Image (spheres, grey):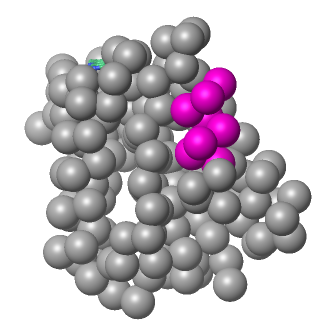
Amino acid sequence: MKTGIIFYSQTGHTRQAAQKLLEAMRNKGQNAELLEIKVSNAEPEKELNKLQFVNSPSVTACDKLVFASPVWAFSLAGVMKAYLAGLTSLSGKTVSLFVTHQLPLPWMGGNAAIRQMKKICEEKGAKITSHAVISWGEKRRERDLLEMVDRLT
Ligand SMILES: Cc1cc2nc3c(=O)[nH]c(=O)nc-3n(C[C@H](O)[C@H](O)[C@H](O)COP(=O)(O)O)c2cc1C
């Protein structure tokens, strides 16, 4: 059983969270790897209709998947949205989701982004097993990271 943690990160927060999750999964003996979505656009949030994917991870080798993304403008980051939309099928995969955002409460973008990810993944046949929203502000970051790792491992 292999888990692919597929993430997009513009400024490094989601990458750090994904690395923590990877470490925790490996400590529990799970076979997991990080797979990064990369685009070459300098300001992808302003160029959503001309994204240039330079790394678009394949899901075929993984039975379990984690999709992780930042929140942009109270919504799912457009890069993750485009990546998920481009996947052919998630049939037979179990999927967990997490997002990072800056504002302190989950309804300030995080919950909406999770709902969007969930919808796209379920339409492609995935079974969603867990999700988490991480507020990156100093007050909540550590607590939210621990909770995400706890829920997703
Ligand atoms: C274009 C843009 C829009 C953003 N919109 C929101 C938002 O609506 N709510 C929020 O809490 N944070 C927002 N943020 C902050 C990011 O969600 C937050 O810093 C996130 O952790 C960044 O993840 P990354 O470092 O993996 O790219 C926005 C950031 C960018 C660049």
Q: How many marks?
A: 0
Tell me: residue 46, above or below residue 90.
Answer: above
Q: Residue at x 57, y 55 (%)?
A: 151
* Lateral position of residue 117 relative to residue 9, left or right: left
The stretch of residues the image draws in magenta is 142-149
For this rendering, which residue is in front, 128 or 49?
128
Image-quarter location of ligand 1: top left
Percent coordinates x, y for residue 125 in the rendering: 27, 82
Magenta stretch: includes residue 38: no
Specify whether residue 148 is painted magenta: yes
**In the drawing, does residue 98 fall left or right of residue 20?**
left
Query: Residue at (80%, 49%) from the top-left corner?
Result: 23
Instruction: Residue 70: give x, y in percent of width and height.
Output: 39, 32
Location of residue 28 in the rendering, given as x and y in whole percent from the top left corner: 83, 65
Whether residue 74 is visible, yes or no, is yes
25 versus 98 height, above or below: below
Quadrant of the rendered image containing residue 147 = top right
Farthest left residue in view: 49
Quadrant where the image shows the N terminus: bottom right
Identity of the residue drawn at 27% across and 55% down: 117
Q: Quadrant of the C terminus?
A: bottom right
Give me the residue at 63% from left, 70% from top: 3
The image quarter containing residue 89 is bottom left
Predominant secondary structure in magenta? helix
Judge from the rendering whether residue 78 lies leftward or rightward of residue 30; answer left or right.
Answer: left
For residue 74, what is the image quadrant? top left
Q: Position of residue 142 (x, y in %)?
A: 65, 25
In terms of depth relative to the viewer, which is nearer, 105 or 53? Answer: 105
